[in-house]
């Protein structure tokens, strides 16, 4: 179960962030060419890919139309949680799709502290009332904001995308896990409704990494969240761009191998990290 898959098609939707090799179609045909070897069954959870404002519902409808062909079993839709009654209307519209199980309001593009505002928290409470989840995609400096959100809306299941985007350096100049990130991740993990995605680190390295560089960050996540609140995600195709200039064929498989070998080295339940934890968090049956 790929807990963090993006699908992109600039001929269907408009995106103002695409550039270089990402400014292309990454949909059913392309993901089927990147299927993982060494697994018996593969499925995915689609995570909104940030089309321009106003196209969140169109994105859900498009993904619904290619879900069977691309292996998508659930959708985390895009939504602004800071618009009061307009947020309520948007969530109601998104609920028309049975595949929608949660929402992502992309916090990494907001100022630090944004998730602590009452306007945002109101929207988060609306998610909780619907029984939906929230994907928190934040920068390292914003992990503490996610903790504050978990404290203020304790009945909202939250998953931290990409381990909170810690500074990992490059393959040639790796960085050790920072003390502030360790501290903030541990504080967040004290909230049992919060899970963590083992995803996105390839993008933080520039698309080229070594296992020795990455595994200390996975170790910290394991230490604080435990094996029952971790889930693997590819962050495809964003994490398949090498040095910002080329699409790296096979990098999704490489990231799968990195995490699989790390899990085996710690004698972890691979079925949990690569399948059932994601099903549990997103309520997929």
Image (cartoon, rainbow, N blue to C red):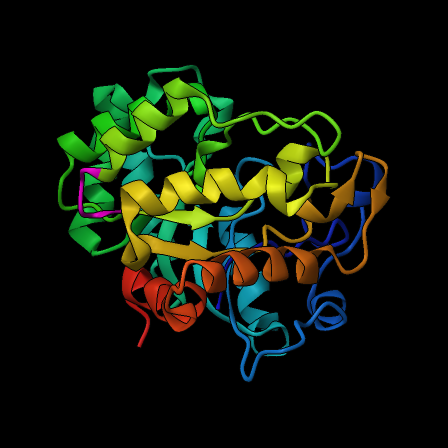
Q: Is residue 96 visible?
A: no
Horizontal side of 18 relative to 85 (left or right) equals: right
Q: Which image quadrant is residue 280 in?
A: bottom left
Q: Which residues are magenta?
A: 190-194
Residue at horizontal 38 percent and vertical 42 percent from the top: 221
Q: Where is residue 125? Give x, y as percent.
A: 18, 39
Asked if 81 appears above or below 277 in the picture, the reply is above
Q: Where is residue 52? Give x, y as percent.
A: 60, 37
Q: Where is residue 78? Give x, y as percent.
A: 46, 45
Horizontal side of 36 relative to 162 (left or right) equals: right
Does 139 lie within the magenta span? no
Residue at horizontal 25 percent and vertical 19 percent from the top: 117
Residue lying furthest bottom in this view?
40
Task: Say how many tags the image has.
Answer: 0
Q: State the residue in front, 230 or 74.
A: 230
Horizontal side of 228 relative to 2 (left or right) equals: left
Horizontal side of 28 relative to 177 (left or right) equals: right
- Figure quadrant of the C terminus: bottom left
Q: Which image quadrant is residue 242 in?
A: top right
Q: Where is residue 213? Give x, y as percent.
A: 61, 37
Residue at horizontal 60 percent and vertical 54 percent from the top: 6
Q: State the residue in front, 249 or 31.
A: 249
Q: State the residue in front, 13 or 193.
A: 193
Q: Is residue 47 visible?
A: yes
Does 191 lie within the magenta span? yes
Q: Main secondary structure of the magenta part?
A: loop
Residue at horizontal 63 percent and vertical 55 percent from the top: 255
């Amino acid at each position: 179960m790929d807990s963090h898959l993006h699908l992109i098609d600039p001929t269907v939707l408009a995106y103002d962030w695409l550039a270089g090799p990402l400014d292309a179609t990454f949909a059913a045909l392309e993901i089927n060419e990147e299927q993982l070897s060494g697994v018996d069954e593969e499925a995915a959870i689609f995570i909104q890919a940030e089309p321009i404002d106003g196209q969140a519902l169109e994105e859900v409808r498009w993904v619904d139309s290619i879900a069977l062909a691309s292996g998508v079993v659930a959708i985390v839709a895009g939504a602004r949680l800071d618009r009061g009654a307009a947020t309520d209307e948007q969530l109601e519209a998104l609920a028309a799709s049975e595949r929608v199980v949660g929402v992502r309001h992309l916090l990494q593009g907001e100022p630090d502290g944004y998730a602590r505002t009452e306007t945002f928290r109101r929207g988060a409470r609306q998610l909780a009332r619907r029984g939906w989840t929230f994907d928190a995609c934040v920068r390292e400096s914003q992990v503490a904001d996610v903790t504050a959100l978990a404290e203020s809306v304790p009945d909202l299941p939250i998953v931290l995308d990409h381990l909170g985007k810690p500074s990992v350096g490059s393959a040639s100049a790796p960085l050790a896990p920072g003390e502030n990130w360790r501290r903030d991740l541990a504080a967040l993990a004290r909230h049992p409704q919060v899970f963590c995605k083992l995803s996105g680190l390839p993008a933080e390295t520039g698309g080229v990494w070594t296992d020795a560089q990455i595994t200390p960050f996975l170790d910290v996540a394991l230490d604080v969240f435990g094996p029952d609140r971790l889930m693997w995600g590819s962050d495809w195709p964003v994490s398949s761009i090498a040095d910002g200039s080329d699409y790296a064929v096979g990098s999704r498989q490489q990231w799968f191998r990195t995490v699989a070998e790390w899990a085996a080295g710690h004698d972890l339940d691979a079925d949990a990290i690569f399948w059932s934890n994601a099903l549990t968090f997103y309520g997929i049956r």
